[in-house]
Amino acid sequence: MHCNKAGPDGIPYELWQHLHCKFQLDSKAQTPSFNVISCMKTVLNNIQEHGVDARTQFTLGWMCPIYKKKERDQIKNYHPITLLNTNYKLLMKTLSIHLASHIHSLIHPDQTGFIPKRSIFDPIRLSQTMCAYYADFMEEDSVIVALDQEKADDKIDHHYLLETLKKFQLPDRFIQTVHFLYKNAETAVIINGVANTPFSMI
């Protein structure tokens, strides 16, 4: 099955960009206009304040298989991808940007992965220096243990995540919004254009 980039609501980013460009043109021409950014801001602020209406599909994701390589009749050659609503992703991106603006005061400098303005080459050079120090000066054998939890993002318990956010003393509104977005999140598997009954990923 071919999957479009849009989620269950069928609305791509391009629609919001087009409406915003039209608003700018209409405003310059002093003709009636629709400020889609202001409208979206109102909706997303309402979600942060009151949560997600369970009757909507705001947090619904469509999971469908994407062909990778080799034989098309082998399930192992397909990669599952979940398509989310654009509005949902915009709100999550907004939260991510807010968090990133304070991340350097929250996370130790030794943690460089996935943090803006930090380079993974710093710990690599530190590891190389430590190995050289032990080999040349301490004259002792050394071992580096590399641990990598595959697909760690998919295995984080949501209750643990919320408790971690509280431990870092993030604003209650931020934590509450994350809770709202995960609380009613459901996924429907799409195979050959047919969707199963949505289920919770929690």
Image: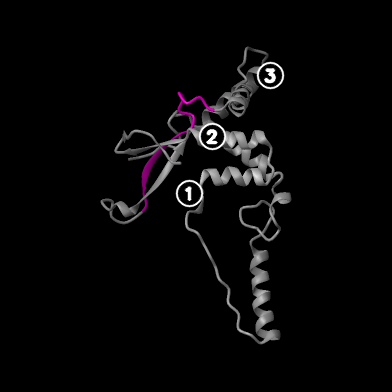
Q: Is residue 97 magenta?
A: no
| Above or below 40: residue 199 | below
Residues rendered magenta in the picture: 52-68
Residue in the foreground of this view, choosing between 14 and 75: 75
- Horizontal relation, residue 27 to residue 43: left or right: right
What is the CA distance from the residue labelled 3 to the residue labelled 2? 37 Å
SS state under label 3: helix
Q: Which residue is drawn at the image coordinates 68% and 13% (left, top)? A: 30
Vertical placement of residue 108 versus 7, above or below: below
Write down the residue under mark 3.
Answer: 28
The image quadrant that residue 16 belongs to is top right
For label 1, the SS is helix
Residue holding disc 1:
154
Tag of residue 181: 2
Q: Position of residue 51 (x, y in %)?
A: 56, 27
The mark closer to the camera, 1 or 3, is 1
Left or right: 91 as drawn, with respect to 187 = right
Dot 2 or dot 1: first in sequence order is 1
Count of numbered badges drawn on the protein: 3
